[in-house]
Each structure stands twice: as structure tokens, then as C-alpha cells.
Image (cartoon, rainbow, N blue to C red):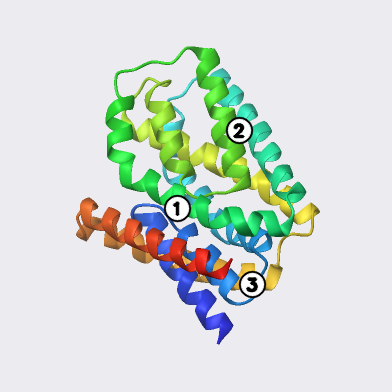
Amino acid sequence: MSDLLLLAAAFGAGMLNAAAGGGSFLTLPALVAVGMPAAVANATGTLALLPGYLTGAWALRRDIAQSEPGSLAGLSGIALAGGTAGALLLLWTSGAVFRNVAPWLLLFATALFLFAPLMLRMARGRMLSPGAAAAGLFAVSLYGGYFNGGMGIMLLALFGMSQRGDFSAINGLKNLLSGVLTVVAVVVYVAGGLVEWREAGVMAVGATVGGFAGARLARRVPVVVMRAIVVLVGVSMSVFMFLKI
């Protein structure tokens, strides 16, 4: 029964990530529901969703190639450093502390999705200095290494204020750096013994299948409807996590 729950949650997470984002809103609560400690659930769910970031970056590789190689290398280095720091912070956080913080992080990520259109409009046309952009990327990468939810929205807003190019190029860069910092975070999680491999494997299968379904769904369902679904799921799962504390 627990494997069926994880498969269903991962399938839904894959659909959400492919269509609008917010997959961790389902993976984290599902893993907690089957008895996994919150920090371990966070790390295991991140590993399960990792292939989606990598395939997303591959799909937009031509757009990513528009970036200057030197700039891309520098951004990747910052993402690696921030993702590593965030993952180490998760390892050093006690289980009890993360269990209490997790519902607030879910609620925060839900708020990011809710206000994402406003954030992206505010970011448009404003340019950060190189130093401020680098500091912002490190901060978002640190957050992403610690807790994945809502990271993509923050990266899109940041790149809207620091990178020149069309949305496809910026979105491709977002996918690439999400993959980079998530890979290094997962390596740290594995080294620290936070990953449950069997559950991660079960969820990876569900998320992969859900990703294909979500890509088709995204073409048929209006964006505003998908965003409403993500926010509803986020609020519901935040309430669930608060009740589990």
C-alpha cells in the first residue's frame, strides 16, 4: 500500500513539474506519510525528481547554448557552491528542527507559486549588478540545496533581472542550474546517509511517467488553471505537514 501511495504521489509530482512546477509539494508529504523522517523524506524526494531537471535542461540545450561559455561556467560554479552549502546545512540540521521547519518551507514555496506572476513582472526590465546577481544565485542555490520547493520560480525571477535573452534561453538556464545544484545536493545527501534508495527508485518511476503525461497536459490546460491546482496542492500539503508536527 505504501508503494502505491509513493507511486501515485510521484506520478502527480512529475505531472506538476512538467506542467507548472511544485512536484515537491507531493513527494515530501507522501514520504512523511509512510513514516519517513522529514529530512530523509526531503532528500529522498529530491533524488526521485532529479531526472526531471536533467531532461528539462537537455530539452532546452539549444537555448542554453546561447549563453556565453565563460558566463555559464561561472554561474554553474556558484550554483555548485550554493547547492553544496545548502545540502550540508540539511545534514547538520537536527531531525526535530527540520520537522518543525518543513511545513513553513512548504507554505513559503506555495506563496512563491501564488505570487510568481507578480514577481516575474517586477523583475522584467530591472538589471542587477554582477555582484548582486552572483550573491542572489548563491542564496537561491543554498535554499535549493536545503529545500527544493519553489526554487525554479526564484531562479526565473533572478535571471530576469540579471540575464539578457528571451524567455526560452532564461528558462533553459534555470533548468540547467537547477539540475547542477540538485546533483551536487543529492551527492551530499547520499554521502550523509539521508537517502532511502528503494523509495527513491519507486518514486523515480512514477515521476518519469508523470512527466510525460504532464507535458501533454500542459498543452491542453490553461496556465492559470495549472497554477491554481499547484497552489491548492501546496496549501493542502502544508496543512497536512503542520498536523504531522
Which residue is located at x 52 percent, y 17 percent?
132
Disc 2 + disc 3, Cβ < 8 Å: no
Image quadrant where residue 13 sits: bottom left
Q: Is residue 24 left or right of residue 101?
A: left
Q: Amino acid at mark 3?
A: Glu
Q: Which mark is residue 79?
A: 2
Q: Which residue is mark 3?
A: 199
In front: 221, or 138? Answer: 138
Q: Amino acid at mark 1?
A: Leu
Disc 1 + disc 2, Cβ < 8 Å: no
Which residue is located at x 45 percent, y 42 percent?
152
Between label 1 and label 3, give the one nearer the viewer. Answer: 1
Locate residue 186, reporting x and y percent: 68, 51
- Of the numbered discs 2 and 3, the one sitting upstream in the chain is 2
Helix, strand or loop at mark 3? helix
Q: Amino acid at mark 2?
A: Ala
| C-alpha span from label 1 to label 2 | 24 Å
Q: Count up the numbered dots.
A: 3
- Of the numbered discs 1 and 3, the one sitting upstream in the chain is 1
Which image quarter is the N terminus in?
Answer: bottom right
